[in-house]
Structure formats: structure tokens, C-alpha cells
Image (cartoon, rainbow, N blue to C red):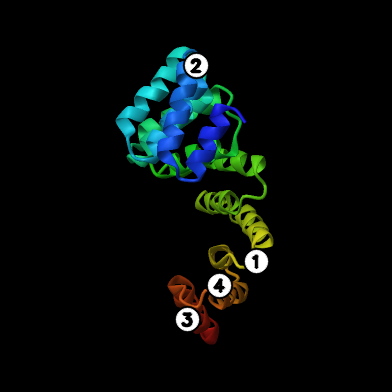
Amino acid sequence: MNLIEKGIEHMQANELEEAASTFNQYIEENPNDPVGFINFGNLLNHVGEYDKAKNFFNRAIEIDSKSGTAYYGLGVLYFEQEDYQQAAREFQSAVQFGLNDADAYYMLAVTLRNQQNEKLALPYFQRASELDKKDEEIQFQYGLSLAYNGQIDHALTQLMYVTELDEQHADAHYNIAVCYLHKDLAQEALTYFKKTLHIQPDHMLAADGKIKVEEYLKEV
């Protein structure tokens, strides 16, 4: 196990002082390798030392101006501070410089969504979903993005896929119901509102939807 792997292991075990010491040792031994600076930056990000973290990521970029992981670290830093415009720039640089990773595309998409730019977010959600077919959250958010962009049939297919990954995913069932409402299929919507409440009895939106659909069906 090299020092980077050892430092990451310390981070995962929440042994932060040990992780810092290990990454620092790696940097001292490899001052021209951006990897040490990136991992130390990630550690500082983790503990909320954003200004210090920024210095480490920028140092990594000075060493390698095309380090996608350094730009990704900066993106996370700005995202945590809710500076979504700058975060989007950093995540875009990350993927531009070859970080072909589901998390990078997903974070870029979420950042764009937080700027109310769902149309631009959609292709990045799609790419993230292609890169990690088993990540339920990525798949679910892609389904929501399809729905937000008016692609209801595609959203239905995607949300059904989420329920295949996790049949207890209450919000996926709820949004399937909403999609059926958009297609004027009230009975199908009612079925999925009921499924949502079976999984999560305190799902208030599903409870409200169920009542309204039942009232509607009584009148038709």
C-alpha cells in the first residue's frame, strides 16, 4: 500500500490527523506530483477548510493544468459553498480534461439544476446514468430531469428502471404516479400513489395525490 492509499484509508476511517500526516509525507517526497495536493485538498474540503483546500487544488493545477480530478475537487469546494456558477465551471473543466466519471457528470448536472437550468443539466444526467447503471440516485435524478424537460414517456421508463433497482424506492413510485397524471391516466396514477404509501405511509404528497385522484374518479 502506497502513501496515497494509506492516506485515503485513514480518511475513510475518519482518522483525519493521520491522513493529513500521510498526504503531507507524500507531498514532501513527491513535490511535483499533483496527486498528493489533490488528496490533501480533498481532506481539507472534508473538514470545511475551503480556503486552504483551494490552495492545494490550485497548486495541483499549476503542476498539471489538465488535471481533471483537481478541477473536480474545486467544483466540490464551490458546490459546498453554494457558489453553483463557479462550481459548474470547475466541473465542466473536469470533464473537459478527461474525467470520464459518473460522479463528475452527475455533480455538473446537479449544479446546473441548482441554477434552474434543467435543460442543460439533462445531457449530463444522461451521461452519468450511462456510466453507472446501478447507482439508484443517479438513475432517479435522471428520471426526474427527463420529466422536468417534458419527456414524460422516457421519464416513465427511467423511473420504472429505478424501481427495478430498488422496489422500495418510494419517490420513484410517487413520480411514476405524477407522470401518469400528466398522461391523463388517473387509474394508473392511483395505483402508484398507493404503492408509494405502502412503502412510505407518511409520504404526504402521495397521500394528497391519492385523495385527489380518488375524488376525480368518483366524478367520472
First in sequence, mark 3 or 1: give its number: 1
Q: Which residue is mark 3?
A: 211
Disc 3 residue crowd, few under 14, some 14–19, many 20+, Cα 10 Å: few
Task: Name the residue nearer the viewer: 212 or 60.
Answer: 60
Residue at mark 3 to residue at mark 4: CA–CA distance: 13 Å
Residue at mark 4 to residue at mark 1: CA–CA distance: 10 Å
Give, as a three-letter code, the residue at label 1: Glu
Residue name at image x 63 percent, y 56 percent:
153
Residue 214 picture location, percent across and down: 52, 82
Disc 1 residue crowd, few under 14, some 14–19, many 20+, Cα 10 Å: some
Residue at mark 4 to residue at mark 2: CA–CA distance: 55 Å
Q: Which residue is mark 2?
A: 29
Task: Name the residue nearer the viewer: 131 or 11.
Answer: 11
Q: Which quadrant would residue 162 be assigned to in this image? A: bottom right
Residue 164 picture location, percent across and down: 69, 61
Secondary structure at numbered mark 4 = helix
Say whether residue 37 is visible: no
Residue at mark 2 to residue at mark 3: CA–CA distance: 66 Å
Task: Name the residue nearer the viewer: 143 or 9.
Answer: 9
As drawn, 161 above or below 35: below
Q: Which residue is mark 4?
A: 196
As drawn, 87 above or below 157: above
First in sequence, mark 2 or 3: give its number: 2
